Amino acid sequence: MPPLAQLPNMNPSSWRDNRLPEMIWAGLLFSTLPRNNVFEKMNELATYFSKYRDSENPIFNISLSGIAQMPLDKQEEIIHLISTPDEFAKALSPLLLFDSLPIKDKWEKYLSRHTPEWKPLMVAVAKLLDHQSQESTDCRWVRVVCMIAAGQLSFPKEMEEVVKGIVYYPDYGDLRVVRPTIRATEGGFAQLLDQESSWPSKFWAECLEKTGCFPLLRSNQETFNSVTTIEKIKSVYSDSIDVCNKTRITTAVDSKHETIFGMIFYSLRLLMELMRINASQSISAQLVLRSLVECYITLTYLIKKGDDILWKSYRVFGSGQAKLSYLKLELNSESTNYVNVETLQELANEDIWEEFLPIELGHWTNSNLRKLSEEAGIKEIYDQYYPWASSYLHGHWGPIRDTVYETCGNPLHRLHRIPSTQLRTLPDVLPDACRIVDLILGIASSCYPEIQLKVSSENFQITLVGDGNE
């Protein structure tokens, strides 16, 4: 649990979802007009607020909802102040695109001489989505400085330099300190200023209703590593068969020998499948990588333990799984195409009659792969490959989000997710897969030195650059 999430009574608030719509008027000004001109206007606004700091009902909330809650005369005065001269009114005119704009009739009085357009609003929101952007910080400063001017926010005397940094922003103090102070101060008072305002949700709802989605264009650079060839893999496969035949010493069940070479052949077969066109950049390639890593960890564990009972346990567990599967399939009236029930029955009865074959429902060592990797001394391989590749196998949200959704390029939609219209090419797993297969061959050679084989070869890179749609 992250430290911030452990704080008691923590109630986070969102700049993007809640406060950005409230300060979009300031965002339109900062993103459209010269920054110095806007700061001059904001200082005028702060001066206006300071006039009422000693009144019974001081005004200090400069959000759109806050302005709507002010006395009628103050509403008129503030809107007139920030929409004058005419270039300010033009910059603010996109506010009229919203039917739910608080006190829209008051805004129309000063802005209706201009035709509102969506593009300036998109630009403004795009610059404000990041709560730490320059434009967002400027808007957040407006809220803070108006509270200070209205006498609703005070600091102890020893923080005089901090106050000067805020009041005279952006022309005083170290901005690397001042900017975070402004953001932290504004965020701390967010719930006080925006209590139960319905405008933010209406703002985003109208943006979605009135504007369309389009995918976010992004530069696409892919590097293909030619680490091996299909001929190289087939050669290693053929050589491994020769070594397997030369090192066989019995026709009886030999759990260690058959498991070692079985994993070699299985890994090489998986690698051959990755060599098919685009296969190594597909979703299923992640599943292949996971299988290779599991084979390597399991084999390394078995070899380092050097226990004949463990070799037999691994084999018996696999046979028991075949038995369990075919018994369940026999009870099912519907046929399946992915497996042959007779084959499963043969596998279950190959070493011992199934009547004597136990079925383990847990792990074959009453452990798990992470613990096996620790005992085998290769936990770093587990950490590097297994968790993320496993998330593809389990259909977790991360891979689903990454593979079938795109980010909407319309900033008015808050960078939400839209279904991808094209198959996304994933990072190439082939270099990693070759590395794992070479590790499998390497650990196997500790038992059979004749295995002096590698699938990796001298590699070169091919880099393709596109605009994200090619």
Image: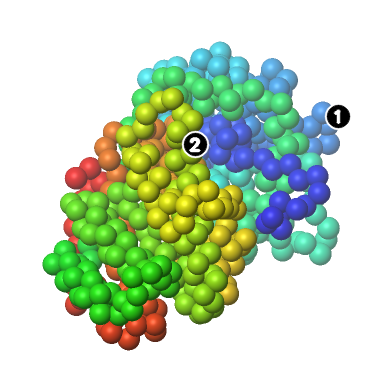
Q: Residue furthest left?
A: 231
Mark 2 vs 1: CB contact within 8 A:
no
Q: Quadrant of residue 145?
A: top right
Residue 14 at x, y percent in the picture: 62, 40
* Label placed on residue 459: none
- Given this view, does label 2 or label 1 mark the residue nearer the observer? 2
Q: Is residue 43 visible?
A: no
Alpha carbons under labels 2 and 1: distance apart:
79 Å
Q: Is residue 205 above or below residue 252?
A: above
Residue 209 at x, y percent in the picture: 44, 19
The residue positioned 49% from the left and 70% from the top of the image is 311
Q: Earlier in the sequence, mark 2 or mark 1?
A: 1
Q: Residues within 10 Å of mark 1 (few under 14, many from 20)?
A: few
SS for tag 2? helix
Name the residue type under label 2. Lys
The residue positioned 29% from the left and 33% from the top of the image is 421
Q: Residue furthest bottom?
A: 449
Considering the image in quadrants, where does the C terminus appear? top left
Q: Is residue 221 above or below residue 54?
A: below
Q: Is residue 121 above or below residue 186?
A: above
Closer to us: 173 or 238? 238
Residue 28 at x, y percent in the picture: 47, 35
Name the residue type under label 1. Glu
Q: Quadrant of residue 64?
A: top right
Closer to us: 428 or 320? 320
Considering the image in quadrants, where does the N terminus appear? bottom right
Mark 1 sits on what residue? 56
The residue positioned 39% from the left and 51% from the top of the image is 347
Mark 2 sits on what residue? 328
